[in-house]
Amino acid sequence: MRYFVLNFLFSLKMSNFAALMKITEMETLDWSNLGFGYRRTDGNVRCIYKDGAWGEVEVTKDEYISLHMAATCLHYGQDAFEGLKAFRGKDGKVRIFRLEANAERLQSSCDGIMMPRVSTELFREMVTKVVALNERFVPPYESGASLYIRPLLIGTSAQVGVNPSKEYLFVIFVTPVGPYYKAGFAVNNCVIFRDIDRAAPFGTGRFKVGGNYAAGMRASYAAHEQGYACEIYLDAKEKKYIDECGAANFIGIKDNCYITPKSTSILPSITNNSLMQIAHDMGMTVEQRPVPEEELPTFEEAGACGTAAVISPIGRIDDVEQGRSYVIAKDGKPGPVLTALYNRLRAIQYGDVADEYGWVTVLE
Ligand SMILES: *Cc1c(COP(=O)(O)O)cnc(C)c1O
């Protein structure tokens, strides 16, 4: 009896201690200096596809997944993911940016590598659930930080033959990430490598699949080693047109025109899609067409766009092998058009301006 009482008191103390530790940990989270790394949160959500149907959504604290060593995702790359963000507004409310568009892009990736589609309803249910579960990890408005949401879909059945998996795991985790620009919106330099391709014209470049990242890892590593912010891929067939900037789309600005490459190997960026809409509504002409490298010197401004940074303005692009260098931001500063587009999109994400386009899901 005495043992039980002591044990009970002890466990009570331990749980108090754990709760206290949790609070202290949150209070000491330095939101502005989070960077872009994984941080443990209060849980993740999962759903399993089996016997031709998606099952029940499960919530877990477990950060690990148990996989068969012959799972198709490991050997044959049946792996697609998404990346979106939740923001806390001045009003304290949490806003998730364009979750339907991310659901649709995941569906396209599913079709692309023969995985069953996750419906927009299931995607919405799971994203809102995981964000609500981790509400205390959505950084405060003033920090400029946000909650990154990472949905991942993988083929899990044990197979040795190359065939689509019969079973799948869809998991969504979140992690708080710091503001991309700690020292304010600034320009970055990029490099063109002609000897590494990310994707072929009719390959998987237009799907958000892990394999594309493996294909580009050598280029992205070399770019960073050489002091560049990112690598620029030219079209794989002719090496003539701009395809993508690392894991971001390219934007060029001139004569009140927003120009972005069109190609079958580009991942359709939701940030780019949103910026095209905003540019159009700001009275700009929007052109989505092949952009030859020779056009680079004619741009008044250029940038890379994606969820991580929204826009990363480009200062200079070096084509080392060809011995050419294109200085775009002559004064080394972001131009007025990209700055205005950036500010407008951020204002929508944080709820500073009205969400005219229905892009934002406010967490209830
Ligand atoms: C995710 C990604 C982007 C950016 O897409 P967003 O929806 O804007 O985040 C661009 N290019 C590649 C290759 C990507 O994987």
Image (cartoon, rainbow, N blue to C red):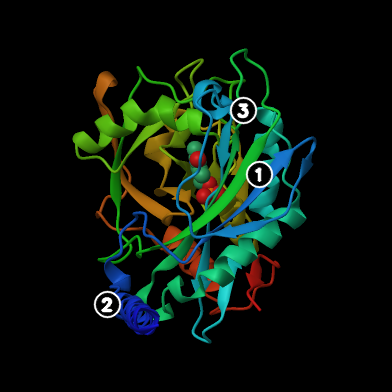
Indicate the position of residue 24 as horizontal and vertical percent values.
Answer: 29, 80
State which mark lies toward you, 1 or 3. Answer: 1
Q: Give the SS element for disc 1.
A: helix
Q: Give the SS element for disc 2.
A: loop
Compared with 295, 175 (above or below) is below
Quarter the N terminus occupies: bottom left
Compared with 38, 118 (above or below) is above
Residue located 43% across and 21% down the image: 197
Q: Nearer the viewer, residue 350 or 64?
A: 64
Kindly identify which residue carries mark 3: 264
Residue located 44% across and 40% down the image: 247
Kindly identify which residue carries mark 2: 28
Q: Nearer the viewer, residue 136 or 30?
A: 136
Residue located 67% across and 18% down the image: 163
Q: Is residue 70 left or right of residue 18?
A: right
State which mark lies toward you, 3 or 2. Answer: 2
Neighbor class of circle 2 (other Cα within 10 Å; few <14, some 14-19, many 20+) is few
Would residue 85 be seen by someone viewing this image from the given angle?
A: yes
Residue located 48% across and 26% down the image: 241
Quarter the C terminus occupies: bottom right
Neighbor class of circle 3 (other Cα within 10 Å; few <14, some 14-19, many 20+) is some
Would residue 272 be seen by someone viewing this image from the given angle?
A: no
Kindly identify which residue carries mark 1: 105
Indicate the position of residue 270 as horizontal and vertical percent values.
Answer: 59, 51
Q: Give the SS element for disc 3.
A: loop
Between disc 3 and disc 2, whose residue precedes? 2
